[in-house]
Amino acid sequence: MGSKGTAYSLLVVDDEPLALNLIERTFAAEADMDVRVTTSPIRGLEIADRQELDLIITDQRMPEMDGLAFLGRVRERRPRAHRILLTAYPEMEVALRAINDGLVYRFVLKPWDLDDMRVSVRRAVEAKRLADAHESMAAKLSAQFDELVRAERLATIGRLSAGVGHELANAATPLLMNAQWLGEEVVRLRELFRACAQAVEAGFPAEALEKLTVLTGRMQERNSDDLNEILASIGAAGMQMRSVIEGMKRAVGDAPDPAPYDLNQGVLSAVSLLRHRFKSRIELERDLTAIPAVLCRGPEIAQVLLNLLVNAADAVESSTLRTVRVRTWERGGKVHLEVSDSGPGIDPAVRNRLFEAFVTTKQNGRGTGLGLSICKNIVESHGGSISVDSESGNGARFTVTLPACA
């Protein structure tokens, strides 16, 4: 139904009381109509300020302001309301221009026939109902797509979890070993401090000095170079762990409002999550040139990067030459990202449908067929494009283009 949920709200503005009363009596008698009438456009604007409206009917010639001026102002208040203009034949050119400009849904010629008026209103009401249904469906589809994007993002992270765990375990090993070493050093320092205290208390006898000499010698075995090396190792391990964690945050975080995003840093974060896959089995080539930032929702673009890199890694698994190449560049006010692989390529019959939902080149159980479809929607929602170039036996090359920040 209408704005109230029980009836369509109709506002009629006409400076001729007889015409106004006839329209009011006609539609007030109908169960699904809630009618408001006024002879004053100013009063009509006040009603529009207070009340949701589904349909507005107004005469063109009125003393306070003409119908088109009134509809222009009421559209600012109630843009979703459908608008009908009552006009005489000489004003048809003006009315047609208003329809083309989207100001008026339709016009009714004066003198109007009551049956024609009923038909016009009913058509406007039906158009409003369909528009509301379309808007509601679009909102539901948008929400479902957002859920699908999140689910696919988490599925991608799930496939990476083993490698991420391996990276964190590798980083934790030197931390644990060095913590043990530092613990042993603390014990030696405590012994040295106790020996110093005892030597001072005993007046530095020969026996106490000999003990100090032995303990000092043991401490010197672990010189400052060793300590610097240990601290550097701890710092490197911490940086590695932070890199992996930041990559995870970029990939799984909720999509915020668009903000400047460093695409090169996004590539590095994605690679850090995939380090376990690329470290020994696949050669990764990077050619990241200086590029401007792109205005985007960072986690969504991070998802695109992860998806393309995971797909490339999957594509070369069975190849003799296992190479994945990623490069970035700027041209013509746009930032370009290319991910290519040395895999078997994509069959032309599949390539033409690759960005459709549920189309996949992977073996059963290895992909949902949603990844590239979602990537396409994400990239296009940011005003960009994504394409693929591939021939069977010659690998594949995916190119993402996004507008650069001004």
Image (cartoon, grey):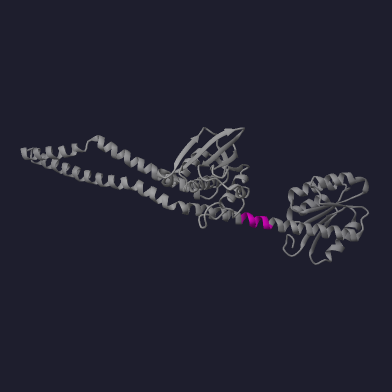
Number of marks in picture: 0
Extent of the magenta region: 136-143
- Locate residue 294: give its quadrant: top right
Vertical order, 1 against 201 (above or below): below
For residue 153, side relative to residue 272 (left or right): right
Measured as percent of width and height from the top left, residue 33 is found at 80, 63
Is residue 129 visible in the rendered structure shown here? yes
Residue 141 among those drawn in magenta: yes
Is residue 10 visible in the rendered structure shown here? no
Measured as percent of width and height from the top left, residue 141 is found at 64, 56
- Locate residue 52: give its quadrant: bottom right
Q: Which residue is nearer to you in this view: 159 or 102?
A: 159
For residue 229, side relative to residue 111 (left or right): left
Measured as percent of width and height from the top left, residue 179 is found at 28, 46
Residue 37 among those drawn in magenta: no
The residue located at (57%, 47%) in the rendering is: 346
The residue located at (89%, 58%) in the rendering is: 116
Q: Which residue is nearer to you in this view: 14 or 85?
A: 85
The residue located at (82%, 66%) in the rendering is: 30
The residue located at (45%, 46%) in the rendering is: 274
Q: Which residue is nearer to you in this view: 366 or 253?
A: 366
Measured as percent of width and height from the top left, residue 339 is found at 53, 41
Q: Main secondary structure of the magenta part?
A: helix
